[in-house]
Amino acid sequence: MVRQRGYRVLAPDLGGHGLSPRDGYSREQWADDLLEAAPENVDLAIGHSLGGVLLAMIVEYLRPRRAIYEDPAWYPADAGFGAAQPAIRAMKDWDADHLRTLSPHWSEANVQAELDALAAWDPDTTRMRYLETAYLPTFPVVPSLILLADPSALITPPLAERYRAAGFDTRTVPGTGHSIHTDDFEGFLAALEGWV
């Protein structure tokens, strides 16, 4: 969809994901890696989940013309980032049946893509340095959209209202979970109207 609209798309693997190196994980290192890999004059930056955290960390330096945060993991657990990590590590053991139960609308191709991603992922990425440091935006550095799941376990309605009051555009895609783009791709695209 974005290529059809004239975008050149870059989707880098973070360390410990895909074919990227496995060693010394931290959000700070990932943020540095993204800034190093990014071209100049970025028109649009999109960050999903952890990617939303990293985009919030670098948006001031990257300065894209627009930023989209898809269900960003700014608030992963009431007890902090460390408390969320065991549950995230457990995802390594998910099988196709578990994914189908969690996401009944996913196609078999989506289920297989997620299994492939989990197979290529190092769960030690959840044992990051500086884990309790929070990276939460307070205002939009550039025009910014927060795209929310329905309901979002990460950005509650009061938090969404706080971000709206701070100047973020917020939109919700009905009936979706954390992976909005996979749960309802057409709804995801519709929610991006005017942004992409």
Image (cartoon, rainbow, N blue to C red):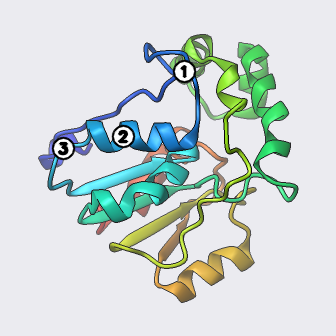
Kind of residue at badge 2: Leu
Q: Which of 78 and 44 lies nearest the eye of the viewer?
A: 78
Q: Do callouts 1 and 2 mark residues in contact (Cβ within 8 Å)?
A: no
- Left or right: 60, with 2 as reference point: right
Task: Give the residue pinned by disc 2.
Answer: 34
Instruction: Note whether 142 is above or below 58 in the view shown.
Output: below
Q: Amino acid at mark 1?
A: Gly
The quadrant of the rendering that contains the N terminus is: top left
In x, y percent, where is residue 75? 71, 59
Label 3: element kind:
loop
Q: Residue at x 52, y 18 (%)?
A: 113
* Disc 3 to disc 2: CB gap under 8 Å: no
Q: Label 1 vs label 3: CA separation?
A: 22 Å
| Residue at point 20%, 54% (across, down) | 42
- First reached walking from the N terminus: tag 3 or tag 2: 2
In this rendering, is residue 103 above or below 27? Answer: above
Q: Quadrant of residue 179?
A: top right
Q: Amino acid at mark 3?
A: Pro
Q: Which residue is mark 3?
A: 39
Left-right relation of 126 to 42: right
For the point 24% across and 38% down, the residue is 9
The earlier-in-sequence mark between 1 and 2 is 1
Mark 3, Cα crowd under 10 Å, few <14 / some 14-19 / many 20+, is: few
Residue picked out by circle 1? 16
Horizontal and vertical percent position of residue 176: 64, 50
Q: Residues within 10 Å of mark 2 (few under 14, many from 20)?
A: some
Distance of mark 3 from mark 2, alpha carbons? Answer: 10 Å
